[in-house]
Structures are given as C-alpha cells and as structure tokens.
Image (cartoon, rainbow, N blue to C red):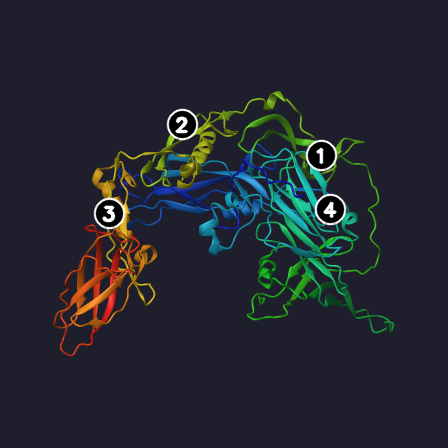
Amino acid sequence: MIDAQATGLSYLPLVFTRNAMVQYVSPLSATQYPNRVQLRYETEVYVQNGLNANTYEMLPVLRGSERPARQINGVLVYPGAEFDVRYLLDDRLTRSLPAFGQSKISLCDGLTRRFYTRARRSNGVTLVDTLTSVTQVAIKGGIAETDFRAHGGRFFSDWQGKFLTWTRNPRPVRLNQPEYLYFLTNATPAPTQLRLRVRINGTAVITLDTLTTVSPFVVYCLPVGPANPALLPHVVNGVDYYEVWVSDQSNARISDVRRYDLDRTHRRNVRYVLFNNSLGCYDTLTCLGRGTETLKVSRNTYERYDDYQASPSFAERIISDVTGERELTLNTGPLDEAPYLAEIMLAEEVFLATDRAFVPLLRQGDSLNTLQDNESLIARPLTFRYANRERNYSRLPATESTAGRATAWRPVATACELTETGLRTGKLLTTMLELFYPSTNEAVLPPVVVPNVPTDAAYVAPVNNSPTCAVTPFLNTAISRQSTVVRGNCATNRVGTTALIQIPAGTFGSELSQVDAQAKAEALYASRNTQEWVDQNGTCQTAAFLNTRISGLNAFYKNSCDSNQVGSRPEITIPAGTYGSNVSQADAQARAQAAWDAQNTQAWSNSNGECLDATIVHGVGNQVVVEVRRQSDNSYVLAPRWTGGFGAYNVVFKNTPSGTTVSGQTLLVPIGFYDTEVVATFELYHNGIFAPHGQYAGIYRMNVLMH
C-alpha cells in the first residue's frame, strides 16, 4: 500500500525569481529630513556563493531616489524607495537538465540559493544608516501574475510536499518515455533520507532509489519514466499503471502521489520534447503526430582571378564556408490538455530526446492556439530550430567515449553543513570540486570546477564532528510574547484570548550576524501571529457578562402550509447565558438581541413554525360553527381578528368529535349586505397564554361562507 503521510511537518517559504521581488526601503524621517532633495537609497544583494556555501557574494548595487510624496487625507506621506531585485538573482540561478539515461536521484545544485539584502540610506554623501534583511531562499521559477498577489507569499507553505509540475495526474506514458519529477526539501524537520517509492499495478511497492545525504532548500530530480533503466524491468510486462511518491527515512510519505498509465498502443511517429516549466523544472511533451525536418544552409563565397590561361577546372568563385540550420516541425497528436501548451510557449529551454542525448532546440513562432471551445480532437503543430549549427554530416552509431589521460576530483572549497534553520550540524562539507591530473597533481586546463553533489560518483562525503563546525556563530535569543490577535472561534458565551508564542533560544542560527539569527526567529513569530494559528492555539474563557433570557413571538406567520392549513407565529427564545461579552452587560444583551433579530424573519418562521388544521364551515342561522381538534382538558380563550364589511354573527367553538361546546364566545364580524365570504383569523390562547407549539393551539385562519 502507499506509505502513510508524514505528520508534524511545517513548510518554510521561498521566493520566486521569475516574479516581482520588491525590496522596500522605508523613508527617512520627514521631521529630521524636511529637505528630501538629497536623500538617496541603495540596495545591496548578497547571494550564496554556491551549494551549501556559508559565504555570500555581493551583486551589483541598485541605487535610486525617493518616490514622490503623496497627499493622503490631508497628510503628506513619503513612500520611500522600492527595488526589484529579481533580475539580479535570476541571472545567478541555473536550471539542471536531467542526465541522459538517468536512473538515480540527482540534485539541482543551481536552482535555489540563499540571499539577503542590505539597504543603505544617505543624505547626500553622508550615510545615515543600513538596514539588513533576514536571510531568504530564492528559486528560479514563478507563477502566473494573476495568481501571484494571492499566492506568491504563501505558495510553498500551501504547496506542501507537491512535485514541482503542472502536468495532469494521472498521466499517460510510453515505455521509452523519459519522465522526471522534482521535489523540494523545504519541510521542517528535514528528512535525513529521500526514498523514491513506486507501487506497481496497485499492489507491489518497491524502493527505486534512496538518497542518504539530503540538504535543506534543495530541489531533487527523480527519474520516474518507464525509460528509467531501474524501473523498466518492473513495468515491461503485464503492468497497466504505477504510482510514484517520495518517503523519508521511516517510509513516511512526504510528497503527493503521481500515477502513470502505460500507453502501449502502436504509434508510427513518437518524439519526446523536454522543456522547462514555470517552476524551474523539466516536463516532457510526447508528440505522436507526423514530423518533418528542413535543412537550410548559408554559404560564404569569394572570387579569385588567375590568368587567361587557367584550366577549365579552375573556379573563379569559391565557397569558403557552409553553415546549416535544421528546422523541426512536430505535431503533438491527440491531446487532452491543450491549455498546458502555454508552458512550452513560455519555456526558455527546450530539448529533443534522441537516441544518444538531449539536443537543444529553439522554439519558433510567437503564437499558439491554447484554447478552442467545443474542440473534439485536440492537436497542435510546433516548430523548432536546432540551437546548434551544422557544418558536416555523418551517421555514426552511439558509443561510449574513449578513455584519455587519467583525471580525478579534489576539494577546493569547504563549508559547515547547516540545518533548515541555519544551525551547524558539526559536519564539514566539501562544496566545490576541481578536476586535476593525479600523475602530476596539476589542474586540468581550462579549469573545471563543479559543485560537490551527493549523487555524483566523485562525491566527497562530509567530515563528521569537525571542530570547525561545532558551534554556530550566532543564535537567536528566546522570544516569549503574546499574539496581537485573539482567538476568534470560541462559543458565543465565551471570549477568546491571545496566545503565547514561544521561540526557544537557539532555534535559529546564522553565519552572518546576530541580527540575522534574531530576524529568523521574528519571522517565525510573525508566521504564527495569525488568526488561523491563534484559533488553534489560543484559549477561550467564560465571558464576564452574560445575556438574560429573551423570548417573544416571531413577527411573521408561517406561510408555507398546505391550502387547508394555517401557519403559526413561532416563539423565538434566546436562553440566558447564550451570549457573552467582556465589555459590558449591555454588549452581551445586544449580542443576544441581534441573534433574536436575525431569527425574526419569514424564512425562520417557515422553518420553525407549525401548520395547524382549520375547517372551512358554513353559516347556520346567526351562528358559524367552527370545529377545532384539541387535546382534552384544555380550555381556550378566543382572541379574534377579521376583515370584511358590516354585520355581526356569533361563533361557537365545539369539541370534536363529541360535539360539546367549549367556552363559546361571541365574535362580532362586520359583514357587508352583499358580502358572501369573510376571511377571519383567530389567535388561540391556552390558559391565557399564546401557545404556538401546542398540538391544537396557535392561529386559525378560515374562510367563512355566508348563506
């Protein structure tokens, strides 16, 4: 069965570099600096030097002046300055294309980086102060601008454990299809292992790969297509579908579950295109339609002159260079998610999967029909140009590269390993490796320096219990502070209180400064100082003032009864102690009255009133006999209301079925000389009290036909 979902996890935020990353610099005091002409603002962006590095590099400085002041309700407001730093950071991040034929979990070392900013406020050439932000993590991705305002700041908190793709789920795949999923490790506590788990045909569960060295805030690439050599033997025969997820070291699931349905239908033309999606990862588009390739060449020629005695084979014009460009046109074939093709239109990197490599392509054309109403068969043509020019032709088979001079990797940069909260673990990491020749101990030229990635064969494992990494330089001090919001989901007769938010000392660490460590703790306090968190963690207490009982009849008669029945006016009662207030008794009473008023409606009367039988009778002489069903031993007093003309009749109430008279009373009903029908309504009281909920008490409305 699918592993049970892990519990007790929370998810830390990241920021997108493909959306606005506005760094706001607050204005200097208008009282201290009434002359704003010389005020200047700067923002310095510092980005992590590399994967797991503890050092930061400063990017080009952004400079600007204060935005013009605005009048708001008669007050002059100075807005300060804003700097969008996304372009600086986005250029420093890189996507990681999967390795061709990849079968193991790999690490996307350039997709995320820690960063922080430092604002500088100056008056002319005089520096006033500097403001350093908390350390954040950037990811090379983005979401649609229409969604960014609502979801940008909370995307990775809400997108808990989901793979970084917008493709459909379940998804059809073919046996030779390269398919990849990407998983972000932003959970806390962070897993110590990543296990790629697969369930075959809903029964057998296997662990396809296990990664034992896991870094926080890193994206991992998981090869999950049938083309994965490790998965192919398990799905080649008799398998209809398989499901994929990621679990931690305890086989607790920390991702969502993706299902892949195997498409074994024969197709003459099948091509696979890899492209980067908006979240910075790579999706696969399967094209089943017919494709064409076109070769276009450009030639450089020059002219030469020998003499008039030249041989007939002498050429006066010579081609000095021929460069070819190939254009590939594919047809997607039947699709069920044409709007998703917008991703490939917005992609910056596109690759064609061949028998030996992922070949780079350039998307041609600036438009694509992504939606057509009432479309039955969905297919789209796509045109690409090969990114690399051609100058020669050959048709050699794919082969392994031949061995050359022996090389090896050696460490060139180290750093202390940090947890997701910035605390040192005591391990010394090798962060960068250099390629060199062991025979001479010389570096390979040109220099080849790469990140030390756990999934690579040359990976250098951490040094445990390193004295250098034993102590985190800066730790936050404890925060124990009440929330600024109160619990809002208490019962109506109880009131919510604030919640105590505690961040123990040493929860967060920093390699930069005490201010950075404390800012991380303050950021956690701010994330908990919300209505949602306080509603779960705050307390409720009995209100100081409670309402007294309020009772009265609804102003509306029930009007949803059958034609031979009449509706009552139900009684509305707010029991004592239902509503409370810590303000005053009047406030508690006002809450109860508001609740009573909210029920004093036609709709509430229709839901809570009763439908009572009323008999339409004919006049007999100068009497109208009305038959009323009632419980024995009840005595009633009649309180009549009527509409009509002039005249008077006696109305006698009788018990049914015995026919004995019950507290008869004369009812004066004005009847016109020509009237033949009078509508009279009677409110029946039990022992002098109106009783709408009694079996026979209530309102009787009847048409009295006159003879």
| Residue pointed to by mark 4 | 102
Q: Secondary structure at mark 4?
A: loop
Asked if labels 4 and 2 touch by Cβ distance under 8 angstroms, the answer is no
Q: Position of residue 96 (x, y in %)?
A: 65, 46
- Callout 4 amino acid: Gln
**Which image quarter holds the N terminus?**
top right
Of labels 1 and 4, earlier in sequence is 4
Q: Viewed as shown, does residue 301 lie left or right of 574? A: right
Q: Viewed as shown, does residue 468 lie left or right of 553? A: right
| Residue 292 quadrant | bottom right
Asked if labels 1 and 2 touch by Cβ distance under 8 angstroms, the answer is no
Q: Nearer the viewer, residue 531 or 228?
A: 531
Asked if labels 3 and 1 touch by Cβ distance under 8 angstroms, the answer is no
Q: Nearer the viewer, residue 462 or 32?
A: 462
- Callout 3 amino acid: Ser
Asked if labels 2 and 3 touch by Cβ distance under 8 angstroms, the answer is no
Q: Which mark is residue 459?
A: 1
Of labels 1 and 3, earlier in sequence is 1
**Which image quarter holds the C terminus?**
bottom left
Mark nearest the camera among 3 and 4 is 3
Of labels 3 and 4, earlier in sequence is 4
The Cα atoms of the two marked residues, 1 and 4, are separated by 17 Å
| Residue pointed to by mark 3 | 551
> What residue is shown at x 53% (from left), y 29% (from top)?
511
Q: Secondary structure at mark 1?
A: loop
